[in-house]
Image (tube, coloured by chain):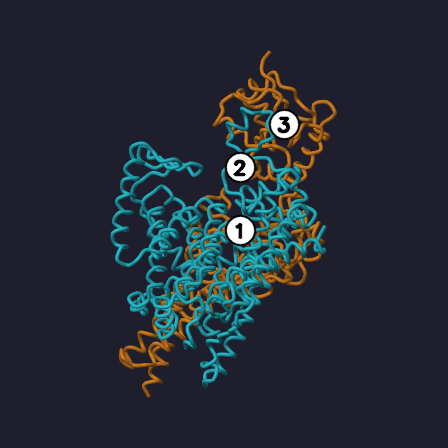
Chain colours: A orange, B cyan
Amino acid sequence: MRRGVFALAVLASWMILVLWAAGIEWSTPFSPAEQREFRGSDFAPVFGTAQADAERLRVESASADHTSLQSLRAVSVDAADLSVLRYRFANFPRTLELSLVFRTADEPNDVHTIALPWPGNATGTFDLGPVPAWRGRIVELGFAQFPTAQLVPPSQGFKPFEIDDASLWSPSWRGNLAALVTDWFGAWPWTQRSVHALGRDTEAPRARPMVLCVALAAGVVVIWAVILFGRRDRRIPLYAAVSLAIGWLALDLCWQSGLWDRLQTTRAVYADLSWSERQHTVADTNIAEVAEELRQMLRDEPPERRIFVQAGSGYELLRLIWHALPLNAASYVQAAFVAGSAIPDGSLIVFFDTDEWRTQGAWRRTLAHSEHLATSASIHGDSFEDDRLVVFRFHRGR
Amino acid sequence: MGVDFTYIAAWVLPLLTGSGVWIALNGGVRRPGDAAIAVGAGWLIGAFVAAGCARWSAPADTAHAFAHAWPWVAVIGVIAWIVAIVRMRGKEFRIRWVEERSVQTGRVRWTRVLWWILLLLVIARFLLIGDEASMRPVFPWDAWSAWSMKPKAWFLAGRMEPYVPMAAWISHADAAVRTAGAWSYPELLAWIQLWFASAAGAWNEPLVDLAWSGALCAFALAAYGYWRAFALPPWMALGLVYALVSLPLIDAHVALAGYADLWVALTLGLALLAWTRWLFFRERGQWVLALATALCLPALKLEGTVWLLAFLVVVVLDLLPDQRRLRVMIATGALLAAVAFVALLFGLGVVRFVKDGVEIASLGTFGLGWHSVGGAMVASLFTLPNWHLLWYLVPLLLILRARRFRDDRSARLLGLLVLFDFAFLFVLFFLTGAGAWAEDFTSANRLILQVVPSVFVLASVLLRDDAFALASRSVRDTTQARVAPNAPA
């Protein structure tokens, strides 16, 4: 009898815990009171090409910058009423990331983007309630896809897929529980932050953490055991150990599933490549190409030649230095900070993806006596001004 | 280029040499799990030996580091095996299967089933993360901007060119030197990477970074062996291994290989395992191994120095006679206070007190003052999916096994070491500007990762059977025995 009560108490407590994790209030209806359904064919391509195929939308190609976007232009939705997004895709490639894109009536010129877990072939659900921008009246809604950032070479990201349907639901037990399942078990890609803190490696707002819920679930077992069987009952350590072990295993199976999903993205790009091809298959192909161009250009320079790099962003700067190895290069900004104007005569100054060398007066003065070296792509006339890569041999004023 | 005989040799040679070194140090003593330790610890030791030989023999021809270094590694391996055989000759090979009694009980069936399930889970995990690591070039930011920068530059340049500060790089424009933000980072890991790259015949990051999978796999084997030697039942030893390798952040550091934190964690963990064995059984070889392994820590990463110092403190405490310990501790405390006072006034080498903070060479200036990073730290430990239930279980274990600290000197010493480590992390995050690393969820978890295997070593000591703990203490105190106490169970 007491065991039965124990089992019931634990199950009831776990149910309350899950409802808490899903953000469900008692007043919330079981099924959504309001729904807006959209067929795939209701979406129209904005970037890339797509064709309606019965009720689906078949997305056939991405735009020149490897992104694709499909939108419902004539939509009018009250964000507060409809905050649970459901979406279903077919044949969505592992190599693409999916985002929800929307505009609000209050800020029609701002496009808001929310990263969604990889949709697979099942229906995904996402609670937009905690998204700060999901407020007021939504006047445009769409899905964007792009090659998984920093993991997939842009040209290899896109493969055709279909949008089956999408819908917006008002909060409900069904919707919020489904959103919790998608949040906890959805497939998120690796990011640069994954080695620092998993769970903080995506900017999307997340549900209450599974780790905390599992720990509470294990604690609930012990508390009910103490209440029903007494503090000195010999079964309590066993219940505690078993519930913690099951909790750990549950978390680990979930993590293992996430690892598997991440591996599938990686395998989609690299599995069929040789070791050599893997080494040369990088997501920032544009930077790698420029680095190769730079290496070819400077192949006759002595290995000690100092090379100072200035780039459009810190990431591009460091990646260019990395890809250009073994060139003896370093950040110009760091050098300027440390050494002022003491750049050695004859050093090379490389500009990547920035036109500062001609738009900023300070740079023009610094380079006034320097020699502009033409890259192979800019050998004719003044075309170098359009190049991503511009190289100077630094000379002081004579 | 690729997986050919040379590349396979680069994996096997450290294993053979390192296992020879471990067995030589271990002498004729045999305990359950020794074979696993010889393979696991052997590979890690061998990797460090290989890196050291490469550094010594190949700075002028880094692209062929393997070709230059392998004969030296082989010679060390042969000498180690000769010493091992000589030390073992004439001794009785007493394989003391501590679990002999327990396997005769009725528990045997379910524990065996559990053991196989755990083994499958561990293997599945290694297949997943190893496959991921073998696929793509180096991915995480610091891996390419800091840790792989030097070995890649040296490999492609064909020679080792020292990394210097930016000012020196600019002022000596004709010198064969390089610079980078991470110019001062230690270089042991770089030479491990060079060892594998040169064996692969090209700078190939998937092949180089598989070493991270190898390191975790080796540590898992070594830890299993040591825990078996500590008389943990097989299912519990493997359960601890599974718990360790299942931790998501550890898996992430193998799958996205390239950071040094995992190597620091495993090296510190190996040092503690060997030292714990010394504490239990007074096997001198294990003490030497623990110290030698710990000395590699500063060569892996700058904060390795902190872990080494903390380790040395407890090593010295262990060696002190009980009656002198208090006096020495007071004297040491006074000395440290005096050093801190001198540092406050005049600075102390790499550490210098400046206005509102402390300046540490190569790391920067850290403002001193209280930083409210409790929320971020709690999130890191208890809610983010990095550690499963580890930080819920550790306090529970400490409370439930609190008596062990009273009864078991080994547990006290290990507990003290872990306390030192966490005290350092507390000071770092809560009292210095490094609190920003906790707030932005960048370095906090990685620094915690470095001490996680140490926490597992402490947990293994707390989980040991009481009777065996008392037996080993008795043996240590009375006989200074070099072999196991008789049939503890």
Q: Chain of mark 3?
A: A
Disc 3 is placed on an element classified as loop
Asked if the residues shown at circle 2 and circle 3 are in contact, with their CB atoms under 8 angstroms apart, the answer is: no
On the image, the x and y values in percent for residue A216 come to 36, 68
Q: Is residue A2 left or right of residue A350?
A: left
What's the amino acid at mark 3?
Answer: Arg
Dot 2, how many residues are within 10 Å of its Cα: few (below 14), some (14-19), or many (20+)? Answer: few
Of B169 and A359, which appears nearest the observer?
Answer: B169
Give the vertical position of B12 relative to A48 (above or below).
below
The residue singled out by tag 1 in the image is A191
What's the amino acid at mark 1?
Answer: Thr
Q: Tell me the CA gap for discs 2 and 1.
A: 17 Å
On the image, the x and y values in percent for residue B210 come to 60, 55
Disc 2 is placed on an element classified as helix
The residue singled out by tag 2 in the image is A314
The residue singled out by tag 3 in the image is A305
Work out whether residue A168 can be spotted.
yes
Q: Is residue A125 left or right of residue A162?
A: left
Which quadrant of the rendered structure holds the C terminus of chain B? bottom left
Q: Tell me the CA gap for discs 3 and 1.
A: 35 Å
